[in-house]
Image: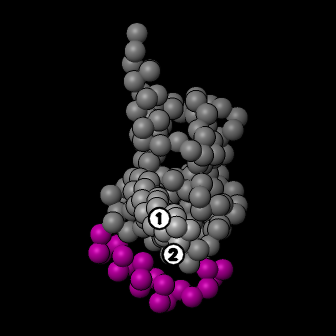
C-alpha cells in the first residue's frame, strides 16, 4: 500500500514538473519590447532632467534588458535566437570571443527599470547562453511620462494604450 502511494506521488510529481517546464519555456519565449512602441504608449519627456545628454558606463543585469530599437523578430525576451542565421552568428561570436571582459560595451537605452538594445544583440544572446548575470554597457537614459517597471510586457503596453484611448 505504501509503495503504491509513493509510486502515485512520484508519478504526479513528474507530471507536474514536466508541465511546469513547458509553462516556463512558453513564458520565456515572450517577444522583445520595441522602444518606439514603448515610447508611444509611455510618453517621452525630452525636457525632463533625468534625460542623459550622453551615455554613462554601467554594469547592467541581463534580466533587465527586455527590448530593442530593432531586431525584435530575431530574438525572444531571453535573447534566444529565433532563426538559424541569428543562431549561427551568435555561435560564430562564441568561437571568436572567449572572454566577455574583452568585448566593447554594448549600447543600451534605459527607460525606468528596463533597458533596450541599440547595439550588441548577439553579445547579449551570448552572455545569456554563458549564464552571465550582467554586461558592461554604455547607457543612455530617457525619461517617460509613465514609470517603466522591470516587469513590463506587451500585454501591459496594450492595456496602457487602451486606457489612454478610453474616454
Q: Secondary structure at mark 2?
A: helix
| Quadrant position of residue 147 | top right
Residue 149 position in % (x across, y down): 60, 40
Residue 46 visible in rendering:
no
Residue 126 position in % (x across, y down): 50, 75
Q: Which residues are magenta?
A: 83-102
Q: Nearer the viewer, residue 55 or 23?
A: 23
Q: Secondary structure at mark 1?
A: helix
> What residue did someone put label 1 on?
8
Q: At 58% from the left edge and 34% from the top edge, which residue is drawn? A: 144
Cα gap from disc 2 to disc 1, whole angstroms:
36 Å
Residue 87 lies within the magenta run: yes
Give the mark nearer the N terminus: 2 vs 1: 1
Outermost residue, top side: 167
Image quadrant where one finds the C terminus: top left
- For the stretch drawn in magenta, the main secondary structure is helix
Amino acid at each position: 500500500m505504501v509503495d503504491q502511494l509513493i509510486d502515485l506521488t512520484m508519478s504526479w510529481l513528474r507530471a507536474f514538473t514536466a508541465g511546469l517546464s513547458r509553462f516556463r519555456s512558453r513564458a520565456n519565449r515572450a517577444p522583445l519590447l520595441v522602444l518606439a512602441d514603448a515610447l508611444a504608449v509611455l510618453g517621452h519627456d525630452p525636457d525632463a532632467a533625468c534625460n542623459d545628454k550622453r551615455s554613462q558606463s554601467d554594469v547592467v543585469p541581463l534580466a533587465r534588458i527586455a527590448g530593442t530599437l530593432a531586431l525584435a523578430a530575431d530574438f525572444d525576451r531571453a535573447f534566444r535566437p529565433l532563426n538559424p542565421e541569428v543562431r549561427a552568428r551568435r555561435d560564430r561570436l562564441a568561437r571568436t570571443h572567449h572572454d566577455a571582459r574583452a568585448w566593447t560595451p554594448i549600447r543600451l537605452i534605459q527607460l525606468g527599470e528596463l533597458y533596450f538594445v541599440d547595439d550588441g544583440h548577439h553579445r547579449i544572446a551570448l552572455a545569456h547562453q554563458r549564464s552571465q548575470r550582467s554586461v558592461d554597457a554604455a547607457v543612455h537614459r530617457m525619461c517617460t511620462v509613465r514609470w517603466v517597471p522591470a516587469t513590463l510586457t506587451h500585454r501591459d503596453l496594450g492595456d496602457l494604450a487602451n486606457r489612454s484611448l478610453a474616454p
